[in-house]
Amino acid sequence: MNITKSLMLGTAAGFVALSGAQAADLPVKAKAVEYVKICSLYGAGFYYIPGTDTCLRIGGALRLDTAFNGTTYDVPFWQGGANGAGSYNRNYFSTRERLNLFLDTRTSTEYGVLRTYANLQFDFAQGRENIAGGFVENDFLFIQFAGFTFGKAVSQFDPQWALAKPYISSGFLAGSNDATGIPQIAYTASFGNGVSATISLEDAQPYRTAGVINASQPFAVPFLAAGITPGYGTSANTFLGNASGGDHVPDIVGNIRLDQAWGSLHFGAAAHEVHGTYYTPASSDSGHPESTWGYAVTGAFELKNLPTGVGDSLKVEATFANGAAKYVWGGTWDSAGAGRFAIANGGTIGFGYILDGVYSGTSAANGTSISKSNAWDVSAYYEHYWTPAWRTSVFGSYSTISYGSGDLALTTAILGGVAPPPGFGTSKLAVAQIGTRTAWTPVQNLTLSAEFIYTHLDQNYSGTFVSSNVPGYGANYPFTIKDQNAYNGAVQILRSF
């Protein structure tokens, strides 16, 4: 009896042990692993990088543009010559495809948010690349920490809505150009209630330097006019009359801002170093003019949610510059290296130069100091939402530049060293533009838009030039100098994500 009982108990214990061993070998449903954890600290689209406390957002846009009677960026045909407004050889339309990608990382620290940001563009533009070419553009690359900004970012001179102007064209003249950022070291102090101030050192090359000329040197690309060889540059950024070189001193920039739900106020200022090169370029023994300082000041405001409708906005900005012309004459049509604006249309032409200053002389004994230019502009943008899906903007600008005591030297240089005849005029230049854009967003993050821009070039020269070197017009082509008009437009499809 006892033997039977012991046998039964032993067998039961064996079954229990066996069952436990088998149970240990069976698969057990594991707790779900959260590979992507949403980060709600900095708005929609951020998630935690696994294993870290850093939040990351990846986004971008695909942009398809077609411009009519203008260059790729919907810029009027400033070049004159073969691409002139009336030239048969011009592109009647230009296309561009662009993929934009950005990375935005943020980490909370005891010093505030540590942020890194990169914005990259992958472009293909008609007439610029080969059949499968293209290029990569680095627009914004910066680190922000404890109030500091290091790297390529929107200039502290400009209002922070500089990238949110309601148009397609980046060739519209609207003050300084921030389309691709300005290298800088900046510090921002916040005082509460939306008030902040920033001081920064910004790289003046290439967007902030318009160049200077030595008016005693002949311009490289001449017109021929009644035996006179005027110096009219026909290629942007390669104007060989430029007599400045090197990046000597960064621009010193500061601003004061007020940001509120109703809009914003912005006041900015910049100090800009201006220098030339040797009076005789081939000889350092000839000396050079002393460098000088130019400056620029700006004021801007934005009004949101106007009585005209929900989402409506008005943006206005005005800038004055002395010896710092590129703070006024910006846009994609970048005239770094002594630029000129020109439109050639049939038998007429109008032109002018955008320079920081003018000097003259062949040695220190007869050389002059740099005479700085004066420039100013005002621009305004109004956008109205007809419905949440439809909106229309109207925008306009007026930009002007003059050369004061340097005017005669500049005009003489344009005429190849010959004093201008009576009634020839001055080197003052102005450009007025007005445009409109209508955009439709049928579904979220997809926008189709179209715009039209009218440009008037107002210059102060008069007379006739006989040119032997403007492409598309033949040898010894006679041009009557007069004001010019240009019309251009664009359509765009933008898919953001």
Image: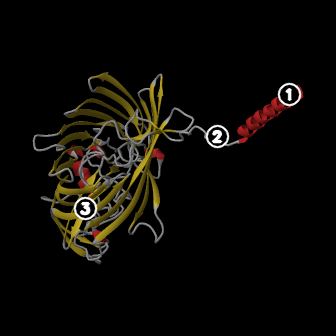
> Which residue has dot 2 on it?
28
Sequence-first disc among 3 and 2: 2
Asked if residue 97 can be seen in this view, the reply is yes
Disc 1 marks a residue whose amino acid type is: Ser
Dots 3, 2 in contact, CB < 8 A: no
> Circle 2 — which element?
loop
Question: Residue 53: x percent and y percent?
Answer: 52, 32
> Which residue has dot 3 on it?
342
In the image: residue 400, left or right of residue 274: left
- Nearest the camera: 322 or 408? 322
Residue at mark 2 to residue at mark 1: CA–CA distance = 35 Å
> Circle 1 — which element?
helix
Asked if residue 231 can be seen in this view, the reply is no
- Residue 428 tag number: none
Residue at mark 3 to residue at mark 1: CA–CA distance = 112 Å
Instruction: Name the quadrant containing residue 347.
Output: bottom left
- Nearest the camera: 12 or 463? 12
Q: Is residue 426 above or below residue 254?
A: below
Dots 3, 1 in contact, CB < 8 A: no
Binning the other alpha carbons within 10 Å of mark 2 as few (below 14), some (14 to 19) or many (20 upward) gives: few
Question: Residue 223: x percent and y percent?
Answer: 28, 67
| Residue at the image point whose x is 24% and y is 33% from the top | 266
The colour style of the image is: secondary structure
Binning the other alpha carbons within 10 Å of mark 3 as few (below 14), some (14 to 19) or many (20 upward) gives: many
Instruction: Name the quadrant containing residue 341.
Output: bottom left
Sequence-first disc among 2 and 1: 1
Sequence-first disc among 3 and 1: 1
- Residue 6 tag number: 1
> Circle 3 — which element?
strand
Disc 3 marks a residue whose amino acid type is: Ala
| Residue at the image point whose x is 30% and y is 26% from the top | 196
Disc 2 marks a residue whose amino acid type is: Val
